[in-house]
Image: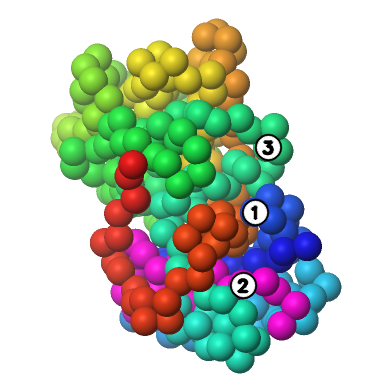
Amino acid sequence: MSSVLGIETSCDETAAAVVDEGRGVRSSVVSSQIDLHARFGGVVPEIASRAHVDLLTPVVAEALVEAGLEGPDVAAVAATIGPGLIGSLLVGVSHAKALALVWGVPFVGVNHLEAHLYASFLEEPSLELPVVVLLVSGGHTLLIHMEAPGHYRLLGQTIDDAAGEAFDKVARFLGLGYPGGPAIDRLAVEGDASAIAFPRGMRDEGLDFSFSGVKTSVITYVRKHPQVETADVAASFQEAVVDVLVTKAARAADQVGAKGICLAGGVAANSLLRERLLDSCIAAGRQAYLPSRAMCTDNAAMVAAAGWWRLQSDGPTSLAVGAYPNLRLPLS
Ligand code: KG4
Ligand code: ZN
């Protein structure tokens, strides 16, 4: 059995996992640094890098113990090489290269965005390509036509803020703290989603997104109506964002004739987005692939899975490879 050790340190999660043949999760350990960054209202890069240095050795050890393997038993060590915070990435990449050298196994550099695309393979053995993937994270909002492993066509992307960034900025403005997405998701349950009609930027045209308008609109509205219920603002904002995401994902699937839509990235953990995408797919007779919340947010199982696929297609990555904060998804 070909087991890959995956390492993920691109932002504020220190994670390690062991995955068999790109699909079978033997272990997945995620150590979140939320408590370290919460009082600053967001991720502090220098604190994140230092925490990765402290946490990575025990996290890798735990992943190996849970998988029942010794280091040299793994077939390869895969690590995220970008995009992400440069200091955080370097900790994971250096650690992975060192382990690969000591154990005498290949190193595989993994693109974090590609790793998110593989999360659904871990939980949906029946997933059939091609699919449309809506990849919504803190830094990206992409609609991808995934034709085969390694073959991605970009259908649409945000022209300004990423969806997760809009959630985080609105949450911070509303005083809901960090990380903002889960806070809005929780509070929205208590609010009236039809209370305020926030704008649906670019909903009725094409496949690109724009979320800076809705963010500004929330700020303007709350300043004008200081007595408004925060839960109503959270629910109405979430409704507007989810409406646009689901409408565009369905349009993309119509355009390329996809039989399924797959969610990926941290924002894919959002309750309303999951519910609405499922409704939309059922209505259109399409398959909806919704990875569990733990697989949507940053983890190393997806890195190990993507690493295994890359090892099959490209072979080992040179140890001369570095870390790339602005790495893009390789498009075909
Ligand atoms: O993929 P991810 O864990 O890290 C990046 O690669 O960016 O995504 C993090 C983003 C953050 O913006 C966070 O607020 C958002 O995902 N997020 C959510 C939820 N959980 C995480 N957004 C909305 N609802 C959620 N439940
Ligand atoms: Zn991510």
In the image, 253: left or right of 7? Answer: left
Which type of secondary structure does the marked residue at label 1 adopt?
loop
Q: Which mark is residue 76?
A: 2
Q: Few, some or many C-alpha atoms within 10 Å of disc 3 (few <14, some 14-19, many ≥20)?
A: few
Quadrant occupied by the C terminus: top left
Residue depicted at 41% across the width and 32% down the height = 145
In the image, 319: left or right of 44? Answer: right
Say if 137 sits above or below 16 in the image.
Answer: above
| Residue marked by disc 1 | 22
Q: Position of residue 280 (x, y in %)?
A: 51, 15
The kind of residue on which mark 3 rests is: Glu
The stretch of residues the image draws in magenta is 72-92
Callout 1 touching callout 3 (CB < 8 Å): no
The kind of residue on which mark 1 rests is: Gly
Residue depicted at 79% across the width and 70% down the height = 66
- Label 1 vs 3, first from the N-terminus: 1
Q: Position of residue 249 (x, y in %)?
A: 40, 24
In the image, 280: left or right of 60? Answer: left
Q: Nearer the viewer, residue 174 or 105?
A: 105
- Frontmost of labels 1 and 3 is 1
Say if 207 sits above or below 3 in the image.
Answer: above
The colour scheme used to paint the residues is rainbow
| Residue marked by disc 3 | 124
